[in-house]
Image (spheres, helix red, strand yellow):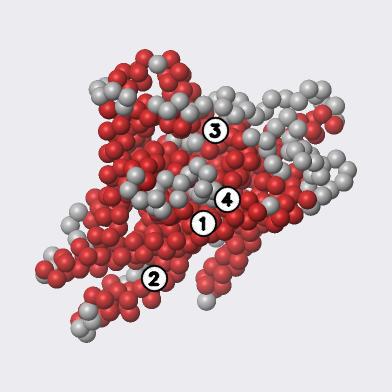
Amino acid sequence: MPTYRPGPVSLLLAVLVALFLLMPLLAVIPVSLTPSRMLTMPTGELSLRHYRSLIEDPRWLDSILLSLRIGIVSSVLSTALALTFSLGVWMFQPRFTAALVGFVLLPMVVPPVVSAVTLYFLLTSVSGITSFFGYDTWLGVAMAHSVMTVPFATVLILVSLSQLDRRIDLAARGLGASVWERATRVIMPNIKFGIVTAALLSFVLSWEEIGVTLFITSVNAITLPRLMWMGLRDNIDPAIAALSVILIIITVLVLAVRSVVTRQRGAR
Amino acid sequence: MRGPLSDRMGAALLMAPLLLFLILAYAWPFLGVVKWSFTLPTPGLGQYHALLTDDLVQSVFIRTLRIAAIVTVVSVTAAYAITVVWVRGSPAQRVLAEFCILVPFWISVLTRAFGWVALLSNRGLINTWLQSIGFISEPLTLVRNEFGVIVGMSHFLIPFAVFPLASAMRSLDERVLLAARGLGSSRMRTFWTVFVPMTRSGIIGSALITFVFSLGFFVTPAILGGGRSVMIAELIYLRIFQSPDWGLGAAISVVLVVFVGALMALLFRYVKPKQLV
């Protein structure tokens, strides 16, 4: 059977776009190897000093640990909230489902800067009441990140629920399973993949979140993106280039593993 | 089928935590922001009046709309070119195209903006190279201006523009294209008169998503614009943190939400939500 394939002009244009997409990611590699203390192209000798400063400078390490902690806490919170909500939607199909789901998705569609102002308002108001859960605290950031990531987790879990065969739940129900048993022993094992994906996506989104974080932190809760931002605004620190190279390599590796795994799943 | 009482209880118990969380942590503080816009520094409509009369605010609004429009055209066109190959290319071409779309998609906005700084700044890759081959003597100003902002934002938004286009191209019946070719239509003509019109819903969806995203963009313009090409989101940040004027920052936020909401309503009037993913 013949197929409709793109012609030479299409291919050429696509190659140009592909180059445009990859160019800035490749550009950080030479910059990260410069021996200079400023952002320049290396001329002649190469140096790994900026990679070393990532390990030796406690600021980088502290912010990496903080971002990990915030990412894990906010991912657990947003996955748990998204999971219970989606189970409620799928098992009971209550009235006003569309409106309720729409409400839950709001932080995803509202411009991030408006969400940032909103969360700034929330955390500065809370700061007056308690000191460990307000503006510029790690718990405050984790909660704000949960607000921002919970719509994405909900979408992923709802999508994997929509591919589930309702009859297995009906069978469990007919055999006398309680709501708790249906949820934990019938439905959840069948959407494991969706739940894990939701947790991972929430973590990644929190790990790289900067738009909201900028509004709700100042000097104490310096996450990794926040530290990068500070380094980008003032004197550009080539350590950011070294860090970017590492983050890009991790992304490429994760995507490669994922594509192998999905191919194997498909082959089975 | 509306279940018995225990079912409704179950639904309520399962759905309540997230709904309560978002009401307390999102809906309520948003109303607080709306309140700020009417009460700070003095109660009344003063901030909204300022929005309509302040020259700086006006020029930022106009610049934001202009940049968003240019970025939308650039991103959708570029996304279209690579999506054609991702959806219709040979298996090897598809894998390569997917790689080029997904790798930038998963890399953070900061890293990507920084990559453009490394390329475009005065001592960046492009200027160093152009100077070393003697093409220019003084570095070109490619960043800290609107050009840099447009390049960086388009780069960020291309992967987002790809997904609605890909879904439209996948649902297109290949036999129509083969029929056009079989009837003697050239590649170009088939593309412009059959392929493009049949992916119209994808183009509209993609353009609206890109445009809406561009309006609230913060990080890329702030880094690549270098304070010289301020867009709405950065103006809100400046009003809240630098010239503490919370009322005006809040009022701009409210206007932005209303505007984006109207655009989304428009989007769903023309495109069904299912066609976007």
Query: Badge 1: how crowded within 10 Å, few (<14), some, or many (20+)?
Result: some
Figure quadrant of residue B111? top right
Residue bearing mark 3 = B221
Question: Which residue is depicted at the point 77% across and 41% down?
Answer: A37
Q: Amino acid at mark 3?
A: Pro
Residue B230: horizontal and vertical position, in percent?
52, 26
Q: Nearer the viewer, residue A67 or B271?
A: A67
Q: Are marks 4 and 3 on the same chain?
A: no
Q: Chain of mark 3?
A: B
The disc placed on residue A224 is 4
Residue A226 in the figure: left or right of residue A159: right
Q: Contact (CB < 8 A) between labels 4 and 1?
A: no
Q: Nearer the viewer, residue B170 or A34?
A: A34
Q: Are marks 2 and 4 on the same chain?
A: yes
Q: Chain of mark 2?
A: A
Residue situated furthest left in the rendering: B5
User: Which numbered disc flags the more N-terminal residue, 2 or 1?
Assistant: 2
The disc placed on residue A191 is 2
Q: Nearer the viewer, mark 4 or mark 1?
A: 4
Residue situated furthest right in the rendering: A44
